[in-house]
Amino acid sequence: MMNTVDSQPPHHVVIVGGGFGGLYAAKALGRADVKVTLIDKRNFHLFQPLLYQVATGTVSPADISSPLRSILSKSKNTKVLLGEVTDIDPQAQEVTLGEEAIHYDSLILATGAKHSYFGKDQWEEFAPGLKTVEDAIEMRRRIFMAFEAAEKETDPEKRRAWLTFVIVGGGPTGVELAGAIAELAYHTMKEDFRNIDTSEAQVLLLEGMDRVLPPFASELSKEAEASLTRLGVSVQTKTLVTNIEGDLITLKQGDEFQQIAAKTVLWAAGVKASPLGKLLAERTGSECDRAGRVIVEPDLSLKGFSNIFVVGDLAHFAHQNGKPLPGVAPVAMQEGQYVAQLIQQRMKGKTLPQFSYTDMGSLAVIGQNAAVVDLGFAKFTGFIAWLFWLVVHIYFLIEFDNKLLVMIQWGWNYFTRKRGARLITGKEVMQATESGYYAPADNRQLVSG
């Protein structure tokens, strides 16, 4: 008679979110003696730091995206599920995916953040943010449709509104968007139109603080502003947006108010955590900060629930220096890897010291041959900083074919100043009108422009 040996099922780690935090956790667990289930409502990982290049026609969405199944195909202990988690039961240790309840032993939540309008959500109709592929494609459509509409416009005042681009928010995303649009208008497309001179376009970058790139050292902020000014961007600091409605944006500088007519307003001013943070707080009694981020313990777990971890933009971690860590990709990567290591150590009856973020530096690109880099021990600007920025972003692109494609594309753009992804997509071919973009006559639905 054969002896039977009771075997425990493998420790099941459920990861919700395939961004930097979730993906790096899954990769770190790829060879561990655990079962991993990665859940995301998208089937791909998106390299968000380069989304602005999709929005301005430098690269295509597929160049900065990789299928999650492909990335994790060699991790035989990992299953990828497409769907959205709608509920969490911390007592039963289950997440709800559609009509299915999935049991977990350890849960990692990494669902990121979306753009925030600081309570003025109605502004989103007029000023799209930049967090998803769809956001980038919509921005790209609005940017290039503005030039097309200006080409057909005969009224000088209306044409000026079409050629006015306002970017709200002077952080890295706003700076990069402003620089890229200025390069489009003043260099790339200068010879492409017959009725307009694209170099007459106005690119305005608005920042509420007293300098752009507030997290950077002051000398780098000054250099970034100088580089933007050389590109032709009008930088306005200490400027608050008080209203956006239709083609009019209302600004406040000190005690003075000003209205600007602009057909294209782009939002890069703030973020808030995904709705899953609020749901998690309700189910576990955890606290959230004003941006909706879940306040976590020193090991990134939840108070009272040591097997639930929150990483990336969804986490409020302030145990290192009293301030929450910034919502940048390196933070999410390191947090995801830390939690993966902690789970493995716990399975051995061990633990790890509290999470500690190693700041490798900050960098932002302004335009061709212009960037700022702060490594802490050294600071760079200009062409050297631009090269460093390029190498870092190529290195962190997930798959080899993406790196090769983007490298070739950037090389071509550098020598020709051309952008091959200047496609107007996302809706029917539009007709520009005074009040917005209309679809063709058989589907005349207003889409605010």
Image (tube, grey):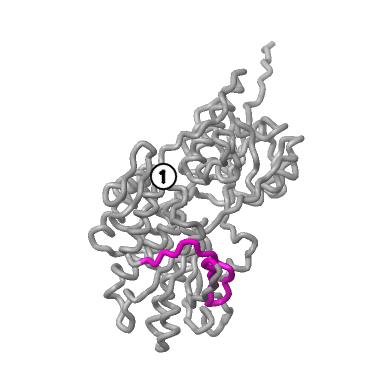
| Residues in magenta, as a range | 233-254
Residue 387 visible: yes
Image coords of residue 110 (percent x, y): 58, 43
Image coords of residue 255 (percent x, y): 56, 69
Question: Is 237 contained in the magenta span?
Answer: yes
Determine which residue is flagged by label 1: 362
Q: Residue furthest bottom?
A: 154
- Residue at 43% x, 68% y is 204
Residue 401 visible: no
Tell me if residue 184 comes above or below residue 110 in the rendering. Answer: below
Question: Is 361 contained in the magenta span?
Answer: no
State the residue in front, 351 or 95: 351
Q: Is residue 407 left or right of residue 266?
A: left
Q: Name the quadrant containing residue 158.
A: bottom left
Q: Residue furthest left?
A: 415
State the residue in front, 267 or 84: 267
Tell me if residue 250 comes above or below residue 95 in the rendering. Answer: below
Q: Is residue 399 left or right of residue 291?
A: left
- Residue at 37% x, 58% y is 225
- Residue at 52% x, 74% y is 258
Q: Predominant secondary structure in magenta?
A: strand
Image coords of residue 202 (percent x, y): 39, 72
- Residue at 45% x, 49% y is 47
Q: Is residue 105 left or right of residue 48?
A: right
Image coords of residue 272 (percent x, y): 60, 53
Please state which amino acid type lies under the numbered disc 1: Ser
State the residue in front, 6 or 151: 151
Identify the element where label 1 is drawn: strand
Q: Residue furthest front?
A: 255
